[in-house]
Image (cartoon, helix red, strand yellow):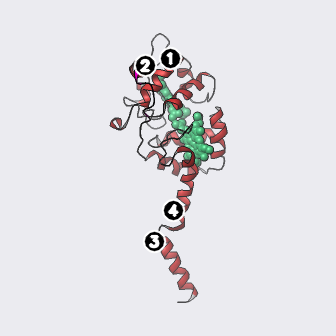
């Protein structure tokens, strides 16, 4: 075998084995999953990405890189994580994570779930809070740029709803206005209810 054919043989073997391209791709995914958990189900303060809406993930990656999503944990972790992310990589990672099956966190207070469900389905007329179901869907599954909420973790949901009321991520219309009208008890109830919505709700 001369030099050229042995080089060719190595390339063919690398190609058949899924080679360097696949290694690069899994490295890109690991850049996210070391924080978001190995199957992207969420870990510590990093939320679940598995099963989240493709378009919503892409929108969030853009709002981190443009520093519009400006709460402290986003600044600390996601601004650096998106600083050098190409549009193509953001597109591919969003498609990858949205296709993974989501597992519900089930970590809210079960006794508050019924109160949370009532707000989710009907809104709160007295404080002019729209029913969440209108946008997020009957099973909190989301659509396009509207996120799936079902099965996200209680502390994450609670923090998101609180931080809009504190003025963070003001560009996330219509949520700052809606969440700003919720009391701490109502936030607890909603975050509890949503944490229990699971697989059977997948459309
Ligand atoms: C160093 C840890 C860390 C790394 C690395 C990281 N993340 Fe995050 N990510 C977080 C934290 C923490 C949050 C929660 C921010 C908040 O509370 O608003 C977050 C939030 C997100 C969100 C918002 C989810 C939602 O439901 O709104 C998306 C999307 C996201 N990350 C995608 C990624 C992708 C894609 C990568 C890899 C390119 C990545 N993250 C790398 C820690 C990290
Ligand atoms: C008019 C439509 C609409 C209504 C009504 C609505 N939402 Fe949203 N919600 C959105 C959109 C759009 C986003 C994404 C905003 C962005 O791009 O950052 C969102 C984002 C969220 C998020 C962020 C999820 C994540 O992964 O970080 C939470 C939590 C949330 N909504 C909870 C609620 C709750 C609870 C209610 C009811 C009290 C509600 N929403 C009512 C449209 C709506």
Q: Is residue 68 above or below residue 2?
A: above
Label 2: element kind = helix
Please give left or right for residue 103 compared with residue 43 in the image: left
Q: Circle 3: is it few (<14), some (14-19), or many (20+) Cα within 10 Å?
A: few
Gap in angstroms between the C-alphas marked 1 and 4: 47 Å
Residue displayed at 50% across by 21% down:
187
On residue 119, the disc is: 2
Q: Is residue 35 above or below residue 197?
A: below
Sequence order check, earlier mark of 3 and 4: 3
Which residue has dot 4 on it?
22
Q: Is residue 14 above or below residue 120?
A: below
Residue displayed at 51% across by 68% down:
19
Q: Is residue 116 above or below residue 50?
A: above
**What segment is highlighted magenta in the picture?**
105-111
Sequence order check, earlier mark of 1 and 4: 4
Mark 1 or 4, closer to the camera? 1
Residue displayed at 46% across by 43% down:
50
Which residue has dot 1 on it?
185
Gap in angstroms between the C-alphas marked 3 and 2: 54 Å
Label 4: element kind = helix
Q: Are marks 1 and 3 in contact (CB under 8 Å)?
A: no
Sequence order check, earlier mark of 1 and 2: 2
Gap in angstroms between the C-alphas marked 3 and 4: 11 Å
Sequence order check, earlier mark of 1 and 3: 3
- Mark yes or no: residue 66 visible: no
Does the numbered disc 2 mark a residue whose Cβ is under 8 Å from ligand 2? yes
Which residue has dot 3 on it?
16
């Amino acid at each position: 075998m001369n030099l050229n054919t042995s080089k060719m043989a190595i390339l063919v073997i690398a190609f058949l084995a899924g080679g360097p391209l696949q290694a690069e791709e899994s490295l890109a995914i690991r850049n996210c999953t070391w924080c978001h958990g190995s199957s992207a189900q969420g870990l510590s303060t990093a939320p679940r990405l598995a099963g989240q809406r493709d378009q919503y993930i892409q929108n969030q990656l853009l709002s981190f890189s443009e520093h519009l999503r400006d709460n402290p944990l986003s600044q600390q972790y996601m601004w650096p994580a998106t600083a050098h992310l190409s549009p193509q990589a953001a597109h591919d990672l969003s498609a990858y994570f949205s296709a993974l099956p989501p597992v519900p966190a089930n970590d809210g207070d079960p006794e508050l779930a019924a109160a949370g469900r009532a707000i989710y389905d009907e809104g709160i007329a007295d404080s002019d809070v729209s029913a969440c179901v209108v946008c997020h869907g009957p099973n909190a599954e989301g659509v396009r740029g509207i996120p799936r909420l079902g099965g996200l973790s209680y502390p994450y949901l609670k923090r998101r709803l609180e931080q809009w009321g504190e003025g963070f991520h003001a560009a996330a219309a219509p949520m700052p206005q809606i969440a700003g009208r919720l009391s701490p008890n109502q936030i607890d109830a909603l975050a509890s209810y949503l944490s229990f919505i699971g697989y059977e709700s997948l459309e």
